[in-house]
Amino acid sequence: MERENAWKSYTDQDKSELNELCEGYKSFLSQCKTERLATKRAIELASAAGYAPLAEAIAEKRALKPGDKVWIDNYGKAIMLVQIGTNDIEAGVNILGAHIAVSYTHLRAHETLRHL
């Protein structure tokens, strides 16, 4: 069974939008070469999209309500974004997970000994 190439069905506008998405992703990869840089940039993007630090709500002792969007980071190396829904938690939650993967080499001045 031969599949039709989806690329052939794209309009010029589709290709333009895809190119814009790819250029943004390439820029993100160029700027965010470590987990900390990627997390920092993700926080900037989340803040621009209306997410607020969960720490602020906790400090203000403010209860979260449906529609609230918050973020929390883990030592600057990971981030979790949460949007509060309208249903009770007993009805379930939707979770989308991802991780930050960067490619780098650890250089050490001295060999490290590892004991098993």
Image: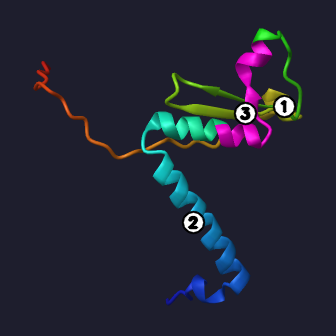
Q: Residues within 10 Å of mark 3 (few under 14, many from 20)?
A: some
- Which numbered marker is on residue 22? 2
- Secondary structure beneath dot 3 equals strand
- Secondary structure beneath dot 1 equals loop
- Secondary structure beneath dot 2 equals helix
Question: Horizontally, is 62 left or right of 54 in the view?
Answer: right
- Which numbered marker is on residue 30? none
Residue annotated with mark 3: 82
Residue 39 in sight from this viewpoint: yes
Question: Which numbered disc, 3 or 2, marks the residue that appears first in the sequence?
Answer: 2
Q: Quadrant of residue 111?
A: top left
Question: Which numbered disc, 3 or 1, marks the residue that appears first in the sequence?
Answer: 1
Residue annotated with mark 1: 68
Of 38 and 85, nearer the camera is 38
Which segment did they paint magenta? 44-58
Q: Nearer the viewer, mark 3 or mark 2?
A: 2
Residue 11 in sight from this viewpoint: no
Q: Quadrant of the C terminus?
A: top left
Q: Is residue 6 above or below residue 21?
A: below
Label the magenta part by its dominant secondary structure: helix
* x then y, percent, for residue 67: 87, 35
Of 84 and 93, nearer the camera is 84
Q: Amino acid at mark 2?
A: Cys
At a point 79% along the width and 17% down the height, the residue shown is 57
Residue 24, magenta (yes or no): no
At a point 53% along the width and 86% down the height, the residue shown is 3
Q: Quadrant of residue 101?
A: top left
Q: Amino acid at mark 1?
A: Asp
Q: Is residue 18 above or below residue 68?
A: below
